[in-house]
Image (spheres, helix red, strand yellow):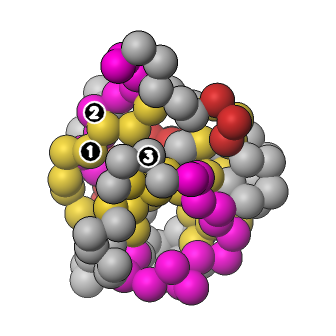
Amino acid sequence: MENNERISSGEGCADLTKLVSEDGKNMKSVLCQRCGSKVLCPGMAIFAEKELFLPSMRKKTGITQVEGTVDGDMLTAHWLVDDMYTFENVGFTKDVGKVKYLICADCEIGPIGWHCLDDKKSFYVALERVNHA
């Protein structure tokens, strides 16, 4: 999959023009970085900027809080989905406080995204945690 594109925190908005349509939606499929499984089809999510903390990427069983500290990243560029049934392939972790993390349902790598249980219509997928093709 050489054609997959990835946005890193150091890249500017010019790269977003390849991913975000004029109406703010994803122009390409959103894929798992590890196994290539399709997470979202084109046109199914809206680009949103929101500061969210995601723990470091690991298998689903590794997302735990140890002694009050969690390794991770503060990410701001996300695909926003308002219905969990919009996803092609996504899984959810057990509740971590008021949050469920999104993972790839096939290979269980994650978290690739974030969902607050208080907001039933907001599912965020971090652009840095997925590929686009």
- Eyeballing the image, is 80 above or below 65? below
Q: Are marks 1 and 3 in contact (CB under 8 Å)?
A: no
As drawn, the label of residue 52 is 1
Upstream in sequence: badge 1 or badge 2: 1
- Eyeballing the image, is 69 above or below 91? above
Upstream in sequence: badge 1 or badge 3: 1
Number of the front mark, 3 or 2: 3
Q: Amino acid at mark 2?
A: Met
Q: Residues within 10 Å of mark 2 (few under 14, many from 20)?
A: few
Q: Which residues are magenta?
A: 68-94
In the foreground, 60 or 87: 60
Q: Amino acid at mark 1?
A: Leu
Upstream in sequence: badge 3 or badge 2: 2
Magenta stretch contains residue 83: yes
As drawn, the label of residue 96 is 3
Residue at 19% from the left image edge and 53% from the top image edge: 50
- Give the percent coordinates (x, y) of residue 25: 35, 77
Q: Amino acid at mark 3?
A: Val
Tag 3 secondary structure:
loop
Residue at 59% from the left image edge and 59% from the top image edge: 92
Residue at 46% from the left image edge and 73% from the top image edge: 27
As drawn, the label of residue 74 is 2
Q: Tell me the CA gap for discs 3 and 2.
A: 17 Å
Q: Are marks 1 and 2 in contact (CB under 8 Å)?
A: yes
As drawn, the label of residue 23 is none
Q: Tell me the CA gap for discs 1 and 3.
A: 14 Å
- Give the percent coordinates (x, y) of residue 128: 44, 41
Residue at 34% from the left image edge and 78% from the top image edge: 120
